[in-house]
Image (cartoon, rainbow, N blue to C red):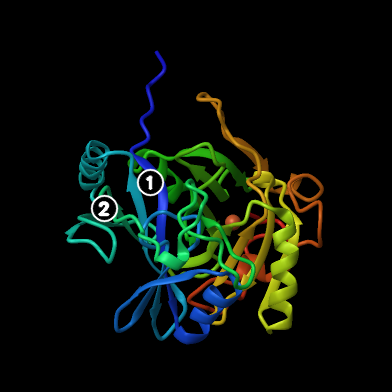
Amino acid sequence: MTKEHFFDLAQLAYTEILTPTLEESLHFFTEYLGMFIVDRTEKSIYLKAYEETYHHSLKLTESTEPGVGAIGWRAVSPQGLQRRVKIIEEAGYGIGWTTGDQGYGETYQFKTPSGHVMELFWDVEYYKPLETEKTSLLNRAQKRPNRGVPVRRLDHINLMVNDVDKMSQFLTDVLGFKMREYVRFENGKMASSWLSVSNLVHEIALTLDPTAETGRLHHVAYWYGYPQNLYDVADLLKENGIFMEGGPGKHGISQAFCLYVYEPGGNRIEFFGDTGYLIFDPSFEPVVWDLKDIPGKGDIWIGAPLPPTFITYGTPIREVKQPPVPAPIMQS
Ligand SMILES: [Fe+2]
């Protein structure tokens, strides 16, 4: 009999991005991407996009180096939260309960085998727009801002990991993700993978880290939903000295329209111009790409190939002597 699958995680709710240039990073997210400041503490600033309903989706924290802090997932229900915490604890990855951060309630923290800190919770505080931010569109959290080219919501995170197989297994067996696509070397080991807890192809992706460092960030992605917005924001960012690494272009894996830039703190940020394809089939089987077959099949087919930095650069920044795979291979 087919084993019944339960998703206990509902969505990626927030990420914490570490930056050595807090005010410059803030300027990038508010003035070019139209995000709103919701709250601040001594070292952190909390931001949201205009279609997001929760308190924040981005916590910018001042740090000596760029990188990623806590990654927050909302559970599908209080029962789902308890169920999943038990599984995490039994697997030996738990850190423990906290009273939660600004805008989020009691939270269970754990550390993944890749060295990333994640948080799981149910209680959320919904954002209450100011009078000037209220919109006549009852299904939108607040007015579309007239700053920059405003992003609409957080889409996914891509982490650099030393062992893609091991981390993928943690995501499927311990957190309940479904594997959607992966790339494998000739020896069968995974080079990268894409997993989700919804109809999206991924809320999380993994990229093989060519360094021995743990816990690095490849990128955080925000969603536009309109391919034209990528050209609009690229035009704006170019004139304001923001480094664009690749795109706009269309991925083979995930089939999404993408653009990659480095925010002023050094972290790679991606923009999604559409959604790629959606998965409704409950018995969907993972799409497996052999590394040797990707050029001409799974690589970008609109726009230029991605540069070598795409597989070597992550944050915190570390020197890479030997890239693990040919340059334009790893995507999304
Ligand atoms: Fe991505």
For disc 1, the neighbor class at 10 Å (few under 14, some 14 to 19, many from 20) is some
Q: Which residue is mark 1?
A: 170
Residue at (47%, 60%) from the top-left corner?
162
Q: On residue 209, which mark appears?
A: none
> Which residue is nearer to you in this view: 285 or 78?
78
Q: Tell me: is circle 2 under 8 Å from ligand 1.
A: no
Q: Is residue 322 visible?
A: no
Whether pointer 2 and pointer 1 mark residues with C-beta atoms closer than 8 Å, the reply is yes
Amino acid under label 1?
A: Phe
In the rendered image, residue 67, in percent from the top left (x then y), is placed at 45, 73
Q: Indicate the quadrant containing the C terminus: top left, top right, bottom left or bottom right.
A: bottom right
At a point 75% along the width and 73% down the height, the residue shown is 235
The answer to which of 70 and 13 lies nearer the viewer is 13
User: What is the three-letter code of the residue carrying label 2?
Assistant: Tyr
Front position in the image: 41 or 313: 41
Residue 178, image x, y percentages: 47, 37
Question: Where is residue 246 shown, x and y percent of the image?
Answer: 72, 67
Could you tell me which quadrant the N terminus lies in?
top left
Give the vertical position of 17 relative to 13 (above or below). below
The image quarter in which residue 108 lies:
bottom left
Q: Is residue 225 above or below residue 263?
A: above
Identify the element where label 2 is drawn: loop
Image quarter where ligand 1 lies: bottom right
Q: Quadrant of residue 263?
A: bottom right
Say which label, 2 or 1, has the lower sequence index: 2
Between the residue at mark 2 and the residue at mark 1, the CA separation in whole angstroms equals 10 Å
Residue 19 in sight in this render: yes
- Left or right of residue 201, residue 228 in this image: right
Nearer to us in this view, 26 or 67: 26
